[in-house]
Amino acid sequence: MVYNVTDKKIAAAIRTEKDFSTALKSRVDVIFLLHSNIITVHQSVKEIHSAGKKVFVHVDFAEGIGKDRAGLEFLARQGVDGVLTTRTNIVRMAREFDLITVQRFFLVDSHSLQTSVESIRLSKPDIIELMPGIVTKKIREFRQLADMPIIAGGIIETEEEVRTALKAGADIVSTGETSLWNLVI
């Protein structure tokens, strides 16, 4: 099933409080919390939803939140729309709590490409994120293999790189570069 998380082409990948404030005011409608914690996640979700945006928590980096069923249930109860992870077991468990799943893959060689394809078959995430996002050749290959949206993320720092990733077949570009968050595509 193809899942459309956003009609916009940019998602804000944030790590700092300053970036959080900038993302809330930007044109994006999806925010990826790359560094969150058990103390602040509830307030962050509340503020993001109040701004009319969806929130995804990167489970692998969430401090104080277990990388297990209880951690995912906690995030669901906080109102998180979805999770990002590199872990196949997290993707599978997240479905129990109706969380949208984004599974991240780092493509560094042909072996990582093969293991990524196998992981997709096992976990069946809603969306995959291919990193780094500037590997447009691999985006094209995954577009042929995967019947799901593709996010290009990582090391995307210019408007040209955003456009190149989208032209290669990515549905969304995830970037921490604040100057790109208001880009009109």
Image (cartoon, helix red, strand yellow):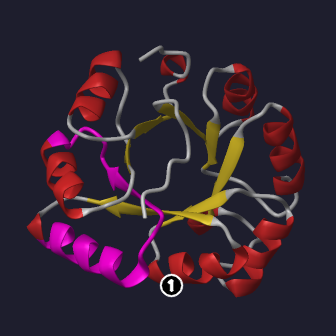
Residue 124 relative to residue 81: left or right: left
Q: Quadrant of the C terminus?
A: top left
Q: Nearer the viewer, residue 21 or 144?
A: 144
In the rendered image, residue 120 lying in the magenta stretch gets the answer: yes
Residue type of the residue flagged with mark 1: Asn
Q: Is residue 37 above or below residue 140?
A: below
Residue density around tag 1, few if under 14, some if 14–19, many if 20 or more, within 10 Å: some
Q: Position of residue 150 (x, y in %)?
A: 36, 50
Q: Nearer the viewer, residue 1 or 124?
A: 1
Res. 86 image quadrant: bottom left
Query: In percent of the image, x 10 and y 66: which residue is there?
Result: 110
Q: Where does label 1 land, which residue?
A: 89
Residue 178 relative to residue 75: left or right: left
Residue 130 relative to residue 40: left or right: left
Q: Position of residue 152 (x, y in %)?
A: 35, 43
Q: Is residue 160 above or below residue 96?
A: above
Element carrying mark 1: helix
Query: In percent of the image, x 52 and y 75: which residue is there?
Result: 91
Query: In percent of the image, x 49 and y 26: which residue is there?
Result: 177
Query: In percent of the image, x 43 and y 64: which residue is there?
Result: 1
Res. 134 image quadrant: top left
Count of marks overlaid on the render: 1
Residue 71 relative to residue 129: left or right: right
In the rendered image, residue 179 lying in the magenta stretch gets the answer: no
Q: Position of residue 56 (x, y in %)?
A: 64, 53
Q: Position of residue 114 (x, y in %)?
A: 16, 74
Magenta residues span 111-136
Q: Nearer the viewer, residue 167 or 136?
A: 167
